[in-house]
Amino acid sequence: MARVRRKSRPKPAPVPLGRMYTLCDEYLVWLSARNFSEDTVRTSRACIGYFLEWCRERSIEDVAEVTRPVLERYQRSLYHFRKKDGAPLTFRTQNSRLRSLKGWFRWLARQNYLLHNPASELLLPRLENRLPKYVLRVQEMEAILRQPDVSTVEGLRDRAILEVFYSTGMRRMEVANLKVYDIDRERGVAMIRMGKGKKDRFIPIGERAVRWIDKYVAEARPALLMASDDGTVFLEHGVAFERLRLTTLVRGYIAKSKIGKTGGCHLFRHTVATLMLENGADIRVIQEFLGHAKLSTTELYTRVSINLLKQVYLATHPGASEKRSADAAELLASLESENDEES
């Protein structure tokens, strides 16, 4: 019986560097067509762009020239890279850049631009399981909230923004995209549309935050409107805030408060989660509140909150306080005395 010969896969034609940029654009369109978030598309564009620039500097002009050793060289270059201030790239940044590359090369192989995927066995850097650098106390949070000059249009807007961050623990993109009709004042809830992962969710919002939003909408927002109004709550020059601009705004008020701590929008999110946990909120409720897809992300705050640990420590450790040390010494002396009497 004659053997049936399998048809060999056609060998891909060489792809010049200019074509590599085109393939990157095609991949980004493919991501958008499959409803990946704008953040994913934006991150992929930037991370693949860094790699293509690295290839251009080394005269790598064909995707077929990109082998696993080449990718490992690129990975080492990320590790040794230093920014303008001399700081290295964090392992989280290195991981992000390489993950985007892995996704692109997987797509190239599936589209038959490559015979095989050179990034399939590339090992990514391990991510540190780091705790937030700072968490604010209630008094520190109140000090930050008092910084905006609410007698001005921008100050009133900024106070409302800070109140929303503190009340809801929203991500900065969620605050930037918040619409006037997303706030249900009667029920005391806010709807987050197209949050991370393009997921909608309802979350509670405090009465004080709602009052500041209403004051801002009535007294300041009309002055910030331009020709059209799409319902976005917080405006700058008639349009929604950019995320980096929100970070700069929040960071400035934290510095102005002179509390000795630094941070941006996420510092409010860390603080909200930690304070809720310390006041008895269930971890799964906090997960739903913050919009975390995985419980392991929320469990980070169980290691930040140490109130319960401190209470147990103070109640049980002999050296935790001077009074307990004195009590322990008195107890030991009493036991020694009893031992002498028995002897």
Image: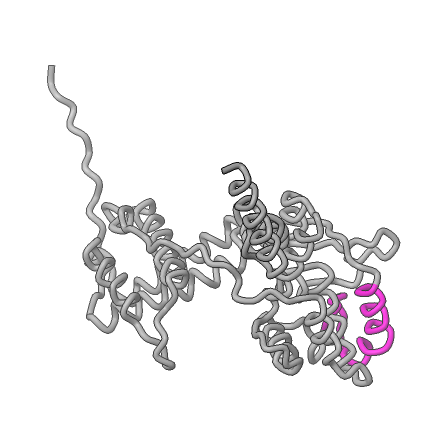
- Determine which quarter of the picture holds residue 237: bottom right
Is residue 87 in view from this perspective? Answer: yes
Judge from the rendering whether residue 250 lies leftward or rightward of residue 111; answer left or right: right
The quarter of the picture where the N terminus appears is top left
Which residue is at the far top? Answer: 1
In the displayed structure, would residue 263 be above or below residue 298? Answer: below
First to last magenta residue range = 208-234
On the image, the x and y values in percent for residue 156 come to 78, 78
- Left/right of residue 34 with respect to residue 94 in the rendered view: right
Q: Residue at x 61, y 53 (%)?
A: 327
Say whether residue 223 is magenta: yes
Residue at (29, 66) in percent of width and height? 79
Q: Is residue 27 left or right of residue 306?
A: left
Total marks placed:
0
Which image quarter: residue 216?
A: bottom right
Q: Position of residue 48 (x, y in %)?
A: 36, 63
| Residue 332 drawn at (x, y percent) | 54, 48
Residue pictured at 34% horizontal, 52% vertical? 102
Colour approach in the figure: one colour
Give coordinates of residue 124: x percent, y percent.
Answer: 32, 53
Res. 113 visible in picture = no
Residue at the image point whose x is 53% and y is 59% from the top? 38
Q: Assess whether residue 279 is covered by the magenta stretch.
A: no
The one nearer the camera, 66 or 257, is 257
